Image: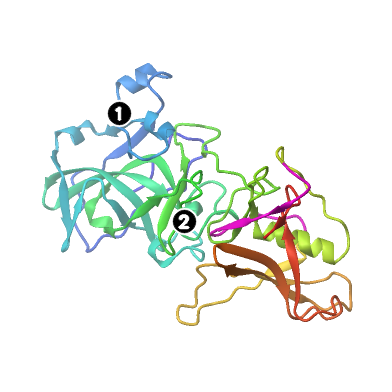
Amino acid sequence: MKRKSTSSASPRKRQKSATNSEQEPLPLEFTTRVVIDKTKDKKKADEAEYEPLVGELDANLDKAFYTVKPVSWNNLKKYKRFSIMSETFQVGDCILVKAAAAVDESRLPDTLKERWVAKALECRAFDEQAVYIRLVWFQRPEDLPGGRTSWHGTNELIASNDTQIIDANTVDGKVEVHHWNEEDDSIDLKDGELFWRQSYDMTKKTSVYSALRGHCSCNQPSNPDELLIRCENKKCLRWLHEECLVDDLATTLLGGEPEVQATENGNANGTSKSKKKGRKSEAVSSKLYDRIRVVDPRSEKVDRLPSVFRITPSEKGRPPFTVKIDEKTSGDNTVYRFVSTDMAGYSAKKPWEQEIKCLCCKSVID
C-alpha cells in the first residue's frame, strides 16, 4: 500500500502495512487522489466527489475533492460499522493503522510508534474477508516535509486532506484525537492526549501548512510540552517562552545587555500579574544553557519538561550553575521567580532569586 500525492511537497510515502495474518491478495487495490477546488479546475473536479473530510478541520481542507480508481469502488456495498477481531468500529472513528518503522520514532509516544492515525470516512466491502476503509490521515510530524520542529509537542499530529483506501485488516484499534484551538487561552491540554492544531493541505504546492499562533518577543509558536508565562500588563498580554526568558537571563548574568523587542502595545513601566499556560518551546539565539531533563524512573520517559536549566559560562574557570523558574501560589495569585541554590561566584545570596520581567514590555511578572 503506497501513498499517492498530487503535491510537490508531499508527505513520506506509507509503505504496505502489516496485517493480522498472512492472507490472499484482495481482489482490487484502490487508490485515491485529492484534486484542487472545483472553482479552480472545473474539469478535474467534475470527475471527482466532494466531502467535508472532518467537520471540525480547518475550513481550507474541506475545499478538496477526491477521486477513486478503479471506479468499481462505487459499486461496493457501504457499511456504517466494521469489526476487526473483537473490536467494532464506526465511520467517523479515529483509528490507529499499522505502520512500518520508516522514520526516526524516538521522540514519538508509544501510541504512535509503528502506527499511523486516521479518521475513517467510509467503509465498503466485497464480503466479510474483503473490507476496505477510506480514510483521511492525521500526519505525524516525522512523516511530513521538514520533519519534527522545536514547537511540535510529543503527542502532536497535523490534520490533512490526504485520503487513502486501506485494507481493514491493517486497523490496529481506536484512538481519540482532540482539536486544540490555540486562540482560546482557557483550553489546556491533558497529559498524554493526542491532539492537532495545524493542518496540511495536499492541494497546494506552497504554503501547505496553516499558520500557528506566534508568542513572545520572538513571535514563534509554542510547544505544549513546555511552559508559557503570560504577562498580565493589560497593554501587553503576551505569552512568554520559558527558554526565551532563561536565554535573556543567561545573557544578562554572563555579560552583555540583551536586546528587548517591544510589542506594539508594549509598556516599559509598571508591574504585571501572570498566568501559566502549559508548555512551550522555541529555538533561541545563544545556547548558554541546557535544559535538565528529569526522567520518571517508573516509565523512563519525560512527559512535561521541567523548568530547570544548567547555565554554562563560556569563560574558563567559571563553574556552571542551575536556574529554575519557581512558582508560588498564594490565594488566587501565582508568583514566578528565577531561583538558584548553586550560584557560587555569582551571588553572595543562598538561595539566589530574581524577579522575571516581560521580554516585550519589561513589566515585572508577579
- Callout 1: SS: strand
Pinpoint residue 308: horizontal percent, then vertical percent.
Answer: 65, 71
**Predominant secondary structure, magenta span:** loop
Residue drawn at x 70%, y 39% as measured from the top left: 265
Pinpoint residue 252: horizontal percent, then vertical percent.
Answer: 83, 62
Crowd class of label 1 (few under 14; some 14 to 19; many from 20; radius 10 Å): some
- Which of the marked residues, 1 or 2, is nearer the chain's N terminus? 1
211 sits to left or right of 318:
left
| Residue 226, placed above or below residue 340 | above
**Do the CB atoms of the residues marked 1 and 2 lie less than 8 Å apart?**
no
Count every numbered label the image shows and give the total: 2
Pinpoint residue 281: horizontal percent, then vertical percent.
Answer: 61, 57
Say what amino acid the circle numbered 2 marks: Asp
Badge 2 is on which residue?
188
In this view of the protein, which residue sits in the foreground, 25 or 195?
A: 195
Residue 285 painted magenta: yes
290 sits to left or right of 163:
right
- Callout 2: SS: loop
175 sits to left or right of 144:
left
Residue 180 visible? The answer is yes
> Which quadrant of the figure has residue 58?
top left
Say what amino acid the circle numbered 1 marks: Tyr
Crowd class of label 2 (few under 14; some 14 to 19; many from 20; radius 10 Å): some
Q: In the image, which is nearer the foreground, mark 1 or mark 2? A: 2
| Residue 343, placed above or below residue 106 | below
Residue 145 painted magenta: no
The answer for how far apart the CA atoms under marks 1 and 2 are is: 34 Å
Residue drawn at x 32%, y 33% as measured from the top left: 52
Pinpoint residue 295: horizontal percent, then vertical percent.
Answer: 54, 77
Badge 1 is on which residue?
50
Magenta residues span 266-286
